Image: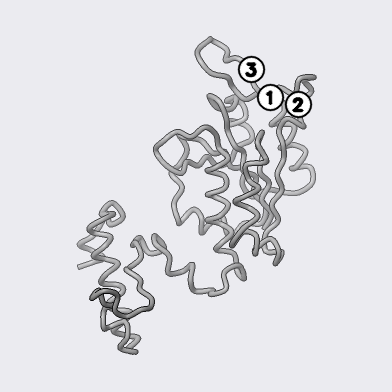
């Protein structure tokens, strides 16, 4: 998979993309991540990529020309499956979308800033708009890193345990059940005996029961038809 990220702050990705799972995925050639400084595509002598909003109002707007030029340059080199814009009013990013995006070959993620991007970009270049939550951040770099991480960890050969991603929270509209490790007894707090029983069927049943219980308690919004699926 190839991910091209368009930003005015490429340095913000140095930490997230050079450690842990993403670093390993890059070293194994499972993903290629390319950062593009939008300022490199402006013809303004001061390297400006934003301007005042037509009609007045507070805040600056990212200009159409440098971003369009960057996208067009990339599209001339290869076909992209999605061109994503990280926007507060975009579709809420969920696990199902991460699963879908992980099956694609080439994607672009455009990081917004200021009051947003010129609407002509959204109308003519962007194919998908995503938000990671109902709050506002200083820019789209952190959402781009979050989206990238959620996609990359799903790629075959990235995680050492291939089944790990399949049991993550939200994969089945359930949050994960409780997990435990050694020691068995810590100051009188003990691991549930079923997990030490060696009975895989009972362990699976316990985990499903706990996942359903925890989802009902903490994220009931994930169970829109609870009576039908989790009686």
Find numbered disc 1 in the image and state the secondary structure of the residue it sits on: loop
Query: Is 45 drawn above or below residue 182 in the view shown?
Result: above
Q: Nearer the viewer, residue 19 or 183?
A: 183
Secondary structure beneath disc 3?
A: strand
In the image: residue 189, left or right of residue 35: left
The residue at 30%/67% (across/down) is 211
Left or right: 62 with respect to 191? right
Image spot of residue 212 (x, y percent): 26, 66
Contact (Cβ within 8 Å) of mark 1 with mark 2? yes
Secondary structure type for disc 2:
loop
Q: Reply above or below: 191 against 51.
A: below
Total marks shown come to 3
List x then y, in percent, for residue 219: 28, 54
Q: Are marks 2 and 3 in contact (CB under 8 Å)?
A: no
Q: CA distance from mark 2 to mark 3?
A: 12 Å
Quadrant for the C terminus in the image: bottom left
Q: Which mark is residue 49?
A: 1
Q: CA distance from mark 1 to mark 3?
A: 7 Å
- Residue topped by disc 2: 42
Q: Which mark is residue 51?
A: 3
Q: Mark 1 and 3 residues: CB-CB less than 8 Å, in contact?
A: no
When asked about the image quadrant of residue 109, the answer is top right
Badge 1 local density, few (<14 within 10 Å), some, or many (20+)?
Answer: many
- Residue nearest the viewer, comparing 107 with 113: 113
Location of residue 55 by image quarter: top right
Look at the image and tell me in which quarter the N terminus lies: bottom right
Q: Position of residue 114 (x, y in %)?
A: 55, 25
Q: Using a 10 Å C-alpha cutoff, classify the residue at mark 2 as few (fewer than 14 neighbours), some (14 to 19) or many (20 or more).
A: many
């Amino acid at each position: 998979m190839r991910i091209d990220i368009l930003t005015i702050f490429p340095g913000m990705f140095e930490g997230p993309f050079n450690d842990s799972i993403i670093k390993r995925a890059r070293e194994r050639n499972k993903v290629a991540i390319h950062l593009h400084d939008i300022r490199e595509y402006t013809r303004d002598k001061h390297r400006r990529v934003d301007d005042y909003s037509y009609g007045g109002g507070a805040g600056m707007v990212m200009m159409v020309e440098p971003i369009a030029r960057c996208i067009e340059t990339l599209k001339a080199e290869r076909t992209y499956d999605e061109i994503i814009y990280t926007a507060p009013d975009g579709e809420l990013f969920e696990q199902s979308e991460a699963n879908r995006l992980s099956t694609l070959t080439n994607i672009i993620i455009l990081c917004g800033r200021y009051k947003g991007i010129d609407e002509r970009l959204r109308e003519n270049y962007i194919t998908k708009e995503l938000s990671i939550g109902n709050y506002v951040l200083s820019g789209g770099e952190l959402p781009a890193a979050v989206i990238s991480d959620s996609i990359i960890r799903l790629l075959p050969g990235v995680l050492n345990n291939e089944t790990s991603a399949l049991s993550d929270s939200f994969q089945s509209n359930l949050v994960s059940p409780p997990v435990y490790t050694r020691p068995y007894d810590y100051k009188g707090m003990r691991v549930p005996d079923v997990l030490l029983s060696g009975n895989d069927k009972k362990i699976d049943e316990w985990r499903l029961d706990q996942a359903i219980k925890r989802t009902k308690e903490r994220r009931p919004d994930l169970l829109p038809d609870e009576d039908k699926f989790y009686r």
